[in-house]
Image (cartoon, rainbow, N blue to C red):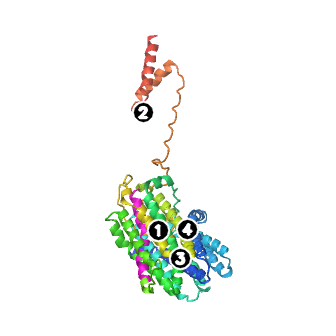
Amino acid sequence: MAKTIGAFFSLYLATLILLLSSGLFNTYLSLRLTALSVSEVWVGAMIAAYYLGLVLGARIGHRLIIGVGHIRAYAACAALVTVTVLALILIEDLWVWLALRFVAGIAMVSLFIAIESWLNEQTENASRGTVFGFYMVASCLGTVLGQLAVGLFPKLDSDPLVFVAICSVLSLIPVMLTRRLHPALQVPAPLALRYYVARVPLSLTVLFLAGMLTGAFYGLAPVYGLQHGMDNHQVGVFLAVSVAAGLVCQWPLGWLADHMSRVRLIRLGALLLLCLGVPLWGWFQFPYPALVAFSGVLGIVQFTLYPMGAAFANDNVDPERRVGLSALLYMVYGLGACLGPLAAGGLMRAWGSDVYFVFVSACAGLLVVFIRERKVKGTHRSEDAPTQFVPMADTLQNSNVMAVLDPRVDPQRDISHDPVIDDPLAAPAAPEPEPTPEPESAPVRAASAGEQQHDGAQGQADPQQVQRAQALAEQARAH
């Protein structure tokens, strides 16, 4: 364990610093816009633009790293993140802020692609699970510390932005000074959308709704807390407890998911999320400690939907196509994270902050309705199902490159880049027409027949052609 941490300490440290700054900034932005009486729709749009940049920027980050290398790409993207943060001090136009958040999302996902591909290339199969576990801990710990760091800045001025910019630059130091060799980059896998939709439609539904919940949480939960009388520090704790509870409980829930029906467990968790959200619809006024307790329980369910949905998807996809599966899960999760804040923000703008938990209950209700055991036919169940439950980071900061760190995935035998030949929805390919044989003289046909008989061990000729050639040869001898 100590050897693994020491071997990748610089990359783990950079990850922690980056997520600390990102976690702080996302919460600060929601609080700052709410304090300025900006519409909840704008708050949701800011986090949606950031997540859209994270999703669409994955391919851009790959091309950038291929072109200039890991360290140069990392340095350029860290500088770009710093610029997008500091520019908010000088510019007040919300449309410009929206564009800056989109660019920041592209730059941030490129940073994590550089780190994750580095980890993957220099990790052996036997230790990938351990490396993945520490990377996930560093990611979630950084996110939790980022929420708690909000309390260090009681005034919503430019000081938090300066701190975020400092962290972005500070993350350069461990990467620039690392002694590790430059890795080769994994090429993104094609999505093969129809193949995976036919195999794992329920898992894609789970991932989409989980993304909606996560995006709305990071964008609108701070607004909910602020409008219910919390100060900045209390809002940070409110969010941090939820993230930390989701992280800690992934291990016991993972054990449970490996020993019972995963569909049933997902549905029970969604039912619990639905029921817990109902008291927070505005019927009662809860004290702050009760709201923190609610946040912790909701986080346990909310932040375990992604790993349980991913585990269920891996149960029903061929082991050789799991890299492509992870890429698609990431895209679907990101799409949900883009739409979730917009939907929740619009609802909160129209009917007040209590509607946030109405939105949470509605998403959970959709899971209860659509995720049922009777819909699982097991037609495409994998040969190694049930696959191992693997804890997953709770945010979209991590790109789809992290999929190859998953112990369930074997990059050496993965064929996600190959064409899908067993797509159940694909039209059967038309057979190629057989070439018309050129006319030959009887002696030549006889010679061909003799060669075909002599080389019968190497290939099999058409029996009718052989008999015809033999008949022609006998006629030639008779004459």
In the picture as drawn, the residue positioned furthest to the top comes out as 479
Which disc number belongs to residue 127?
none
Check disc 1: other Cα within 10 Å, few if <14, some if 14-19, many if 20+: many
- The majority secondary structure of the magenta stretch comes to helix
Which disc number belongs to residue 338?
4
Residue 237 picture location, percent across and down? 47, 84
- Reading the image, the residue beneath label 2 is 459
CB contact under 8 Å: marks 4 and 1: no
**Which tag, 3 or 1, sits closer to the chain's start?**
3
Highlighted magenta segment, given as a residue range: 291-316
Q: Nearer the viewer, residue 450 or 169?
A: 169
**Which tag, 4 or 1, sits closer to the chain's start?**
4
CB contact under 8 Å: marks 2 and 3: no
In the picture as drawn, the residue positioned furthest to the front comes out as 283
Kind of residue sitting beneath label 1: Cys
Q: Name the residue: 47% across, 72% down.
A: 360
- Reading the image, the residue beneath label 1 is 363
- Nearer the observer: mark 2 or 1; the answer is 1
**Which tag, 2 or 3, sits closer to the chain's start?**
3
Which disc number belongs to residue 220?
3
Q: Name the residue: 55% across, 69% down.
A: 343
Q: What kind of element bears circle 2?
A: loop
Q: Name the residue: 65% across, 79% down.
A: 88
**Which tag, 2 or 1, sits closer to the chain's start?**
1
Residue 183 picture location, percent across and down? 51, 65
Q: Is residue 303 magenta?
A: yes
Give the Cα separation between the discs numbered 2 and 1: 61 Å
**Which tag, 4 or 2, sits closer to the chain's start?**
4
CB contact under 8 Å: marks 4 and 3: no
